[in-house]
Amino acid sequence: MKTVLWGFLAAGAWAQTPAAPPTALLSNAEVNQLCQRSRQLMEAGGVAVPDLARAAAPVIENVKQACIQIQLQPNAAQPTYVFLMNVRAYLTLADAVPKPFPFPEAARLQFAEVRDGVTRLDSHFRALLDTKETQIQNADRDNLARYGDANHKLPAPLPGKPRVVFLGDSITDLWRLNEYFPDRDFINRGISGQITGQMLGRMKADVLDLHPSAVVILGGTNDLARDIPLTAIEDNYVMLADLATAAKIKVVFASLLPVSDAHMDVNPSYERTKTRPPVYIKALNEWLERYCGQHGYTFLNYFPALVDAQGQFGAELSDDGLHPNSKGYRLMAPLAQQAADKALGVAPAPTAVSTVVKPKKGKEVSK
């Protein structure tokens, strides 16, 4: 049995994995592969060294949990650091415990592979920290350059055709507004991954300077994922509204969308409720609805149309538990148009009424 196990593990050695990219920064898939491979090797170490199995059990469990967090939070420094420190602790224990003689050559190679993995991950961790430092020092923290050229080329709003800017994160960014609202002057200014503080930094360039009649603001889900306090998110909502109001732009606040864990079998990072707790989404939506009522803003409530009986994002409406798919956007579109029209004081477009013709046989046919 031992021979089979060591042979199986040796067949998956690092030397047989795809070559690492020229940069020290590994892809998410490579980090996840390294995590799982290291855990397998550490567990197998107890086969050749029984004392190590007992001594390293807590360390191996820490590595397992760190791997889960790395899958849930790609490129997060903290779980990567925890993983790295615990693998190093395992190697220290492996050096300290007595080993049988003669020591199996396959086992020696496996321990060497763990050390190589630590070296590889250490380089990745340093590169990850350098990347994050570069992001912090970025002169364009809010990514104003994203729409700079498009804003410059955008013509002035046409008379009788009020402009509405949609300001948001990836949920807005991925929405092809021109396909859902071909006859409206709806401008998409969403940027994936942004928090409300970054949206606030873009408010002048991406909203005020475009001279819209109204702005639809959807943000906050990324704030929750980064553990930004609810009060700070609410303060950003207030400042966004104040800036729009001062510019005589009608304000529409959209509710946060539900999240779901329904697709985590496809990808562990799709377990959304841990990083975006539904109780916090509910609290922010309730605050937004009250705030809009108190200040005369329009509240665009997407939540009821997208949530399922379990209180999560309907599995058929999202492919990753966070972003709407085409079915989800189709449900959101009429709600967004109704909210924009309400804010603008535009009479809602008449809906087509189906007439029913009863043929002689008694069947009803809709036209």
Image (cartoon, helix red, strand yellow):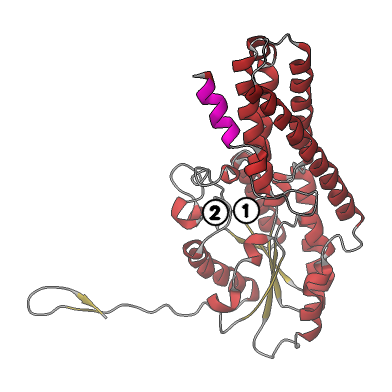
Does residue 81 sit above or below 143 in this rendering? above
Does residue 147 sit above or below 36 in this rendering? below
* Residue at the extreme left of the image, as rendered: 361
x and y percentages locating residue 206 in the rendered image? 79, 72
x and y percentages locating residue 255 in the rendered image? 62, 55
The reply to whether dot 2 and dot 1 touch (C-beta < 8 Å) is yes
Residue 44, quarter of picture: top right
Quarter occupied by the C terminus: bottom left
Residue placed at 92% from the left, 55% from the top? 137
SS assignment for the magenta stretch, majority: helix
In the rendered image, is residue 287 in sight? no
Mark sitting earlier along the chain (2/1)? 1
At numbered mark 2, what does the secondary structure look like: helix, strand or loop?
helix
User: Label 1 sits on what residue type?
Assistant: Leu
At numbered mark 1, what does the secondary structure look like: helix, strand or loop?
loop
Measure the alpha-carbon separation of dots 2 and 1.
7 Å
Question: Relative to the observer, which residue lies in front, 325 or 364?
Answer: 325
* Residue at the extreme bottom of the image, as rendered: 159
Residue placed at 86% from the left, 60% from the top? 141
In the drawing, what numbered circle is on residue 303? 2
Question: Relative to the observer, which residue lies in front, 119 or 10?
Answer: 10
Which residue is label 1 attached to? Answer: 256
In the rendered image, is residue 46 in sight? yes
- The local crowd at label 2, few if under 14, some if 14 to 19, many if 20 or more residues have their Cα within 10 Å, is many
x and y percentages locating residue 359 in the rendered image? 12, 80
In the picture, measured across the screen, residue 308 lies left or right of residue 250, that is: left
Specify start and end residues of the magenta stretch as a single range.
3-11
User: Label 2 sits on what residue type?
Assistant: Phe
Residue placed at 53% from the left, 69% from the top? 333
